[in-house]
Image: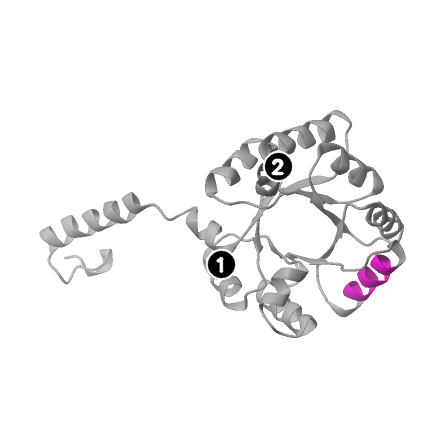
Amino acid sequence: MQLVIDSANIEKIKYLQEYFPIDGVTTNPTIIVKEKKPFLPLLQEIRDIIGNEKELFVQTVGSHAEELVKEAQFINKELPGNIIVKVPVTTEGIKAIKLLKEQGIRTLATTVYTPMSAYVAAKAGAEYVAPYVNRIDNLTGNGIQVVKDIVTIFKEHELSCRVLGASFKNVQQMQQVCLAGAEGITAAPELIEAMLTIPSVDANVQQFKDDWLTLYGKDAINLMETK
Protein backbone atom coordinates (compact mmCIF):
# COMPACT_ATOMS: atom_id res chain seq x y z
CA MET A 1 0.00 0.00 0.00
CA GLN A 2 1.33 3.40 -1.00
CA LEU A 3 1.95 6.34 1.32
CA VAL A 4 2.15 9.57 -0.68
CA ILE A 5 2.83 13.14 0.49
CA ASP A 6 0.21 15.69 -0.59
CA SER A 7 2.36 18.82 -0.59
CA ALA A 8 4.84 20.93 -2.55
CA ASN A 9 6.63 22.28 0.51
CA ILE A 10 10.30 21.43 0.05
CA GLU A 11 11.27 21.34 3.72
CA LYS A 12 8.35 19.13 4.68
CA ILE A 13 9.01 16.76 1.78
CA LYS A 14 12.70 16.54 2.75
CA TYR A 15 11.79 15.68 6.34
CA LEU A 16 9.20 13.06 5.46
CA GLN A 17 11.43 11.53 2.79
CA GLU A 18 14.17 11.10 5.39
CA TYR A 19 12.07 9.67 8.21
CA PHE A 20 9.02 7.97 6.66
CA PRO A 21 8.56 5.18 4.07
CA ILE A 22 7.28 7.54 1.38
CA ASP A 23 6.26 6.28 -2.08
CA GLY A 24 5.82 9.59 -3.85
CA VAL A 25 4.41 13.13 -3.87
CA THR A 26 1.10 14.49 -5.15
CA THR A 27 0.62 18.12 -6.08
CA ASN A 28 -2.18 20.24 -7.47
CA PRO A 29 -2.35 23.86 -8.66
CA THR A 30 -3.46 25.17 -5.26
CA ILE A 31 -0.65 23.36 -3.43
CA ILE A 32 1.95 24.67 -5.88
CA VAL A 33 0.68 28.26 -5.76
CA LYS A 34 1.04 28.28 -1.95
CA GLU A 35 4.81 27.91 -2.32
CA LYS A 36 5.06 31.13 -4.42
CA LYS A 37 7.82 29.71 -6.64
CA PRO A 38 8.13 29.04 -10.39
CA PHE A 39 6.36 25.73 -10.82
CA LEU A 40 8.79 23.79 -13.01
CA PRO A 41 11.89 24.48 -10.85
CA LEU A 42 9.79 23.63 -7.78
CA LEU A 43 8.70 20.29 -9.27
CA GLN A 44 12.28 19.56 -10.31
CA GLU A 45 13.41 20.23 -6.74
CA ILE A 46 10.81 17.77 -5.46
CA ARG A 47 12.04 15.25 -8.01
CA ASP A 48 15.62 15.72 -6.82
CA ILE A 49 14.53 14.97 -3.24
CA ILE A 50 12.50 11.83 -3.91
CA GLY A 51 14.55 10.47 -6.81
CA ASN A 52 13.42 9.30 -10.22
CA GLU A 53 11.82 6.00 -9.16
CA LYS A 54 9.15 7.38 -6.85
CA GLU A 55 6.00 8.76 -8.43
CA LEU A 56 5.47 12.51 -8.77
CA PHE A 57 1.86 13.51 -9.52
CA VAL A 58 1.34 16.79 -11.40
CA GLN A 59 -2.08 18.22 -12.24
CA THR A 60 -3.27 19.86 -15.44
CA VAL A 61 -5.21 23.14 -15.45
CA GLY A 62 -6.74 23.26 -18.94
CA SER A 63 -10.48 23.06 -19.65
CA HIS A 64 -10.61 21.16 -22.94
CA ALA A 65 -9.25 17.71 -23.75
CA GLU A 66 -6.78 19.00 -26.30
CA GLU A 67 -5.36 21.47 -23.76
CA LEU A 68 -5.11 18.76 -21.11
CA VAL A 69 -3.27 16.46 -23.51
CA LYS A 70 -0.79 19.19 -24.47
CA GLU A 71 -0.15 19.99 -20.81
CA ALA A 72 0.41 16.30 -20.04
CA GLN A 73 2.87 16.03 -22.92
CA PHE A 74 4.68 19.15 -21.69
CA ILE A 75 4.91 17.82 -18.12
CA ASN A 76 6.33 14.51 -19.31
CA LYS A 77 8.82 16.26 -21.57
CA GLU A 78 10.07 18.75 -18.98
CA LEU A 79 10.25 16.55 -15.88
CA PRO A 80 12.33 13.39 -15.51
CA GLY A 81 11.45 10.20 -13.68
CA ASN A 82 8.20 8.51 -12.82
CA ILE A 83 5.47 11.06 -13.68
CA ILE A 84 1.71 10.66 -13.24
CA VAL A 85 -0.50 13.37 -14.75
CA LYS A 86 -3.60 14.28 -12.74
CA VAL A 87 -6.72 14.96 -14.81
CA PRO A 88 -10.15 15.95 -13.39
CA VAL A 89 -13.10 13.65 -14.09
CA THR A 90 -14.99 16.11 -16.27
CA THR A 91 -16.26 15.02 -19.69
CA GLU A 92 -13.25 16.73 -21.28
CA GLY A 93 -10.99 15.11 -18.71
CA ILE A 94 -12.24 11.62 -19.53
CA LYS A 95 -11.61 12.29 -23.23
CA ALA A 96 -8.10 13.44 -22.36
CA ILE A 97 -7.46 10.32 -20.26
CA LYS A 98 -8.44 8.16 -23.25
CA LEU A 99 -6.10 10.06 -25.57
CA LEU A 100 -3.24 9.99 -23.08
CA LYS A 101 -3.67 6.25 -22.57
CA GLU A 102 -3.14 5.78 -26.31
CA GLN A 103 0.09 7.80 -26.04
CA GLY A 104 1.41 5.81 -23.10
CA ILE A 105 1.13 8.75 -20.67
CA ARG A 106 0.07 7.62 -17.21
CA THR A 107 -2.80 9.43 -15.50
CA LEU A 108 -4.62 9.81 -12.20
CA ALA A 109 -8.28 10.78 -12.33
CA THR A 110 -8.78 13.42 -9.66
CA THR A 111 -11.85 15.15 -8.16
CA VAL A 112 -13.59 11.78 -7.82
CA TYR A 113 -16.83 12.01 -5.81
CA THR A 114 -18.78 8.93 -6.93
CA PRO A 115 -18.08 5.26 -7.68
CA MET A 116 -19.43 5.65 -11.21
CA SER A 117 -17.13 8.55 -12.09
CA ALA A 118 -14.26 6.37 -10.86
CA TYR A 119 -15.54 3.51 -13.02
CA VAL A 120 -15.67 5.69 -16.14
CA ALA A 121 -12.16 7.00 -15.48
CA ALA A 122 -10.81 3.48 -15.03
CA LYS A 123 -12.48 2.32 -18.26
CA ALA A 124 -10.98 5.33 -20.05
CA GLY A 125 -7.49 4.24 -19.02
CA ALA A 126 -6.64 6.05 -15.80
CA GLU A 127 -4.00 4.24 -13.77
CA TYR A 128 -5.27 5.78 -10.50
CA VAL A 129 -8.44 7.37 -9.19
CA ALA A 130 -8.40 9.71 -6.18
CA PRO A 131 -11.71 9.84 -4.27
CA TYR A 132 -12.01 12.95 -2.10
CA VAL A 133 -12.99 11.35 1.20
CA ASN A 134 -13.51 14.35 3.47
CA ARG A 135 -14.99 16.54 0.75
CA ILE A 136 -17.55 13.83 0.05
CA ASP A 137 -18.39 13.79 3.77
CA ASN A 138 -18.81 17.57 3.72
CA LEU A 139 -21.45 17.17 1.01
CA THR A 140 -23.42 14.87 3.36
CA GLY A 141 -22.07 11.81 1.58
CA ASN A 142 -20.01 8.94 2.96
CA GLY A 143 -16.44 9.13 1.71
CA ILE A 144 -15.35 5.81 3.16
CA GLN A 145 -18.30 4.02 1.59
CA VAL A 146 -17.48 5.59 -1.77
CA VAL A 147 -13.96 4.18 -1.50
CA LYS A 148 -15.34 0.74 -0.58
CA ASP A 149 -17.74 0.80 -3.53
CA ILE A 150 -14.98 1.81 -5.95
CA VAL A 151 -12.73 -0.99 -4.69
CA THR A 152 -15.59 -3.49 -5.10
CA ILE A 153 -16.42 -2.35 -8.64
CA PHE A 154 -12.79 -2.54 -9.72
CA LYS A 155 -12.38 -6.04 -8.28
CA GLU A 156 -15.68 -7.39 -9.60
CA HIS A 157 -14.99 -6.15 -13.12
CA GLU A 158 -11.22 -6.76 -13.10
CA LEU A 159 -10.24 -3.15 -13.68
CA SER A 160 -6.53 -2.64 -13.04
CA CYS A 161 -6.94 0.98 -11.93
CA ARG A 162 -5.71 1.70 -8.39
CA VAL A 163 -7.52 3.68 -5.68
CA LEU A 164 -5.48 6.43 -4.03
CA GLY A 165 -7.55 7.91 -1.21
CA ALA A 166 -7.30 11.69 -0.88
CA SER A 167 -8.76 14.62 1.10
CA PHE A 168 -8.49 13.69 4.77
CA LYS A 169 -9.12 15.67 7.95
CA ASN A 170 -7.75 13.10 10.41
CA VAL A 171 -5.84 9.83 10.76
CA GLN A 172 -9.04 7.89 11.49
CA GLN A 173 -10.26 8.56 7.94
CA MET A 174 -6.92 7.41 6.57
CA GLN A 175 -7.15 4.19 8.58
CA GLN A 176 -10.67 3.51 7.34
CA VAL A 177 -9.56 3.98 3.74
CA CYS A 178 -6.76 1.46 4.32
CA LEU A 179 -9.29 -1.02 5.70
CA ALA A 180 -11.62 -0.33 2.76
CA GLY A 181 -9.06 -1.84 0.39
CA ALA A 182 -7.53 1.23 -1.25
CA GLU A 183 -4.09 0.75 -2.78
CA GLY A 184 -2.79 3.96 -1.25
CA ILE A 185 -3.40 7.22 0.57
CA THR A 186 -2.12 10.71 -0.15
CA ALA A 187 -2.12 13.04 2.82
CA ALA A 188 -0.80 16.37 4.00
CA PRO A 189 2.52 16.25 5.91
CA GLU A 190 0.92 17.01 9.27
CA LEU A 191 -1.43 14.04 8.92
CA ILE A 192 1.40 11.70 7.96
CA GLU A 193 3.32 12.84 11.03
CA ALA A 194 0.17 12.45 13.14
CA MET A 195 0.18 8.71 12.46
CA LEU A 196 3.07 8.50 14.95
CA THR A 197 2.05 11.32 17.29
CA ILE A 198 1.00 9.29 20.32
CA PRO A 199 1.83 10.81 23.73
CA SER A 200 1.85 7.41 25.44
CA VAL A 201 4.72 6.27 23.23
CA ASP A 202 6.91 9.18 24.35
CA ALA A 203 6.03 8.47 27.98
CA ASN A 204 6.90 4.78 27.58
CA VAL A 205 10.23 5.54 25.92
CA GLN A 206 11.15 8.03 28.66
CA GLN A 207 10.29 5.47 31.35
CA PHE A 208 12.51 2.86 29.69
CA LYS A 209 15.38 5.38 29.57
CA ASP A 210 14.89 6.49 33.18
CA ASP A 211 14.91 2.90 34.42
CA TRP A 212 18.05 2.15 32.42
CA LEU A 213 19.93 5.18 33.70
CA THR A 214 18.89 4.45 37.27
CA LEU A 215 20.71 1.13 37.22
CA TYR A 216 23.62 1.80 34.87
CA GLY A 217 24.31 5.48 35.58
CA LYS A 218 23.74 8.76 33.80
CA ASP A 219 26.59 8.07 31.35
CA ALA A 220 24.93 4.91 30.01
CA ILE A 221 23.16 6.81 27.26
CA ASN A 222 23.19 3.80 24.93
CA LEU A 223 23.92 0.08 25.02
CA MET A 224 27.51 0.57 23.97
CA GLU A 225 28.20 2.84 26.94
CA THR A 226 26.79 0.38 29.48
CA LYS A 227 29.31 -1.32 31.78
Q: Is residue 68 magenta?
A: yes
Q: Is residue 153 left or right of residue 24?
A: right
Task: Determine the residue positioned at 58% across, 40% down.
Answer: 138
Camera-nearest residue between 174 and 158: 174
Q: Which mark is residue 16?
A: 1
Q: Is residue 186 left or right of residue 93?
A: left
Where is 24 relative to 39, above or below? Answer: above
Q: Percent position (x, y) of residue 127?
A: 75, 45
Label 1: element kind:
helix
Q: Percent position (x, y) of residue 129?
A: 71, 43
Circle 2 Cα neighbour tier, 10 Å, few/some/many (<14 / 14–19 / ≥20) = many
Q: Is residue 214 magenta?
A: no
Camera-nearest residue between 80 and 69: 69
Where is 101 relative to 141, above or below? Answer: below
**Number of numbered tags placed on the structure image:** 2
Q: Is residue 118 left or right of residue 30?
A: right
Q: Quadrant of the N terminus?
A: top right
Q: Which mark is residue 182?
A: 2
Q: Name which residue type carries label 2.
A: Ala
Q: CA distance from mark 1 to mark 2?
A: 22 Å
Task: Determine the residue positioned at 60% across, 35% down.
Answer: 143
